[in-house]
Image (cartoon, grey):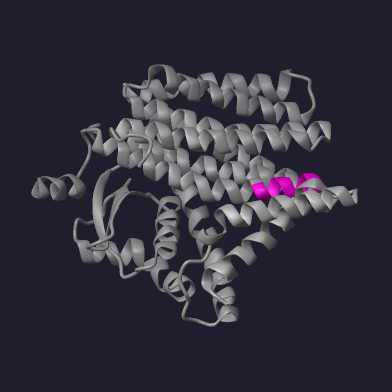
Amino acid sequence: MIREILGMVFILIGITFDFLGVLGLVRLPDVYNRLQAATKCVTFGSAGILFGVFLQQGFNNFGFKVLVGILFIFLTSPVAAHTIARAAHRSGIKLTAETVVDQYQEDHELKD
Amino acid sequence: MRTLRWLVGLIFIGAFMYWNFFIYTGSIYFKLINVILFSTLFVLYRVIVGPTAADRIVAVDILGVLIIGLLALLGLYYQQSFFMDIGLIWALLSFIASLAFAKILEGRSLDD
Amino acid sequence: MTITKRSRIIVFSLSFLVWVALTSISDWQEVILGLIVALVVSLLAGQFLITTEKSKHPVRRLFLAIIYFFKFLWEMIKANLHVAYIVINPALPIRPGIVKIKTNLTKDSALTVLTNSITLTPGTLTVDINPESREIYIHCIEVTSTDVGENTREIGGRFEGLIAEVFE
């Protein structure tokens, strides 16, 4: 009983953060800020949903698959974000006009 | 202008949430799944509109992580663990696809 | 026993455990198939898990890894609340920019864990890493200063000590 309620709470938290992350994907001004919001919130949100499902299922077949899913999300999502950010910067996509400082650009201009 | 857009968005999201939680008469799991499907609407907006190629890659990458949560909830409703198999493989393929897209965007070939 | 051999044995047992957990074994044929699959996996990709000797004692490293996990979880919850506050605020209060920090870590695994942790914690996203000069370029959603030393203390310093203990 307590396990079902706790699992539902985790699922609700996860869905809230999923939704907020996707809102950030729409609202923020350039690709780097969108990556920040989307990666953090959607990773945390999906992991929350999966952990809630694991709490409701316990240690059976489904529960283990869900745990493998959590591990997988936490390993792959930051790597994909990092790769996309570097590719975007190297292919010359500009940062937004509100940007304060870009030390990456400065260092690469010094090298060229 | 920004505040006006924020208000329009708030009314849109509020109308959906009111319909979903007070008018729609489904299981609680389907209400939660509806929220995830509603957020994929925003992701598809970013895929279609996104001013640069990197924005589209970010959106597709995030879609893969959202789908894992959706499939876990579907599996929880139907008490079938094979939904999670589909989710794991979907996440794996979308991760590899993001890496490949990022490499192409960066201007490297896929071998190195 | 060489490092490669030990790495292959660990990969073999881990992949067999994952097989047992995912298939919910009901028949002896599944056990044999799982052993064959784990053997193939460990022969093909087993040498990549452990490549260098670690200097600290394993029990101490496990204990510190658990402490690190809870610290990381707390930072991650703070990060998500911060991003959620920015996203639902009508004024969108951001001051983005890319800053540079220095790190003392040398091993690949330690650097991977550090950059992944930076990506998942408040307002920071790793953009690129320069292995020769040991500099990490980080996109911040709210830049507080442009000084390299101060940013190193604030962004990298939260995790670097523990990661050095666990992975170096």
In the image, taking residue A4 as reference, residue C78 lies left or right, namely left
Task: Give x and y (percent) for residue C145.
Answer: 22, 56
Task: Give x and y (percent) for residue B51.
Answer: 32, 21
| Residue at left offset 50%, top offset 42% | A41
Residue extent of the magenta highlight: A61-68
| Residue at left offset 60%, top offset 41% | A46
Task: Give x and y (percent) for residue C65.
Answer: 55, 70
When asked about the image quadrant of residue B18, the answer is: top right
Depicted C140 relative to depicted B105: above or below: below
Task: Give x and y (percent) for residue B101.
Answer: 40, 31
Question: Which one is in front, C106 or B48?
Answer: C106
Residue A3 in sight in this render: no
Depicted A23 relative to depicted C104: above or below: above
Q: Is residue A19 magenta?
A: no
Q: Main secondary structure of the magenta part?
A: helix
Depicted A61 relative to depicted B40: above or below: below
Residue B103 in sight in this render: yes
In the image, taking residue C104 as reference, residue A55 lies left or right, namely right
Q: Is residue A66 magenta?
A: yes
